[in-house]
Amino acid sequence: MIMVPYNHTEFINIVTDLVNNNYISMDRIDDAVRRILQVKLTLGLFETPLADETLVDQLESQAHRDLAREAVRKSLVLLKNGENADAPVLPLPKKASRILVAGSHANNLGYQCGGWTATWQGVDGNNYTAGTTILSGISAAVDPSTEIVYNNNPDADFIKSNNFSYDIVVVGETPYAETAGDSLNLTIAEPGPSTILNVCGNVKCVVVTVSGRPVVIEPYESQIDALVATWLPGTEGQGVADVLFGDYGFTGKLPRTWFKTVDQLPMNVGDSHYDPLFPYDFGLTTKPVNAS
């Protein structure tokens, strides 16, 4: 079995040439083929080669979307919630005069889904799959009297000239898969960093990261009032709003250490240089606002 996405005939020609010139033995080819055939035999693909479509009408059903939304709620990790426990920022009030939603990832289903989804490397935008963006989820969650202003990358003057009750900044990585995701810096995609600095220096802000892994956040952490890692929440962005506004509490924990700088990497629990921004298994918790 091979994974050559664009030109499989070239692969076949090269391997054939290597076999004919005794660089690869036929025993090696037979071994590779035998193992794949064994897997297909075990899976019953020779008897039933096509997928069972009995339940195909249930794909993307409301029950499936409800379960996906629940998975979003439970996987979010609250990394910061105010300067101390006595003055938490989250959950946010649903009834506010005006709130700003900013950031490149606030209204982008493709970014929420990441790679290996609608396409191999992922997509940019809302035209490839059905779902709810984080912005749409926020809009549905707040009180009808609350005005929501969306601005992808507002400057400081825009923030200062509007009387926002608070701001939600949604930024992160652009989609990738396999080698295309290799990174030596693990930074938030531009203009995300400038959006954080412009907004969080001028109004109470919650920063929501959308990424497949921990990213550099330490330079901005001191200016951020609350910080939430959503990872790649997929199509159900309303699951993020469910927890931001307190319909459900935060319960998620970090599945891996969140570094301060990439110079620390690799870094794992037990290493002599273990000095993370947020340690493995870290995660603040909140209670639903309607809890007794």
Image (tube, helix red, strand yellow):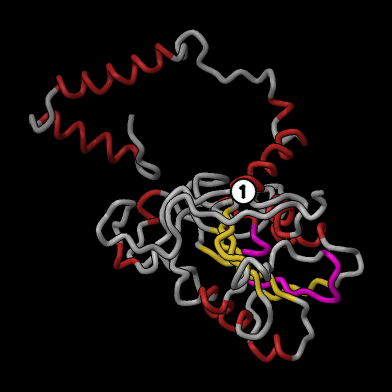
Report the magenta stretch's main SS.
loop
* Residue positioned most to the top: 47
Task: Point out residue 86 in the picture as x, y percentages from the top left corner.
Answer: 67, 68
Mark 1 secondary-structure assignment: loop
* Highlighted range, magenta: 94-108
In this view of the protein, which residue sits in the foreground, 29 or 99?
A: 99
The residue located at (69%, 51%) in the rendering is 249
Residue hosting label 1: 251
The residue located at (69%, 42%) in the rendering is 70
The residue located at (77%, 74%) in the rendering is 99
Q: Amino acid at mark 1?
A: Thr
Is residue 237 at least partly visible in the picture? no
Assess disc 1: are there few (<14), some (14-19) or many (≥20) residues with their C-alpha within 10 Å of its C-alpha.
some
Residue 201: image quadrant is bottom right
Question: The N terminus lies in which quarter of the figure?
Answer: top left
* Residue positioned most to the left: 22
Q: Is residue 98 magenta?
A: yes
Give above or below for 12 relative to 240: above
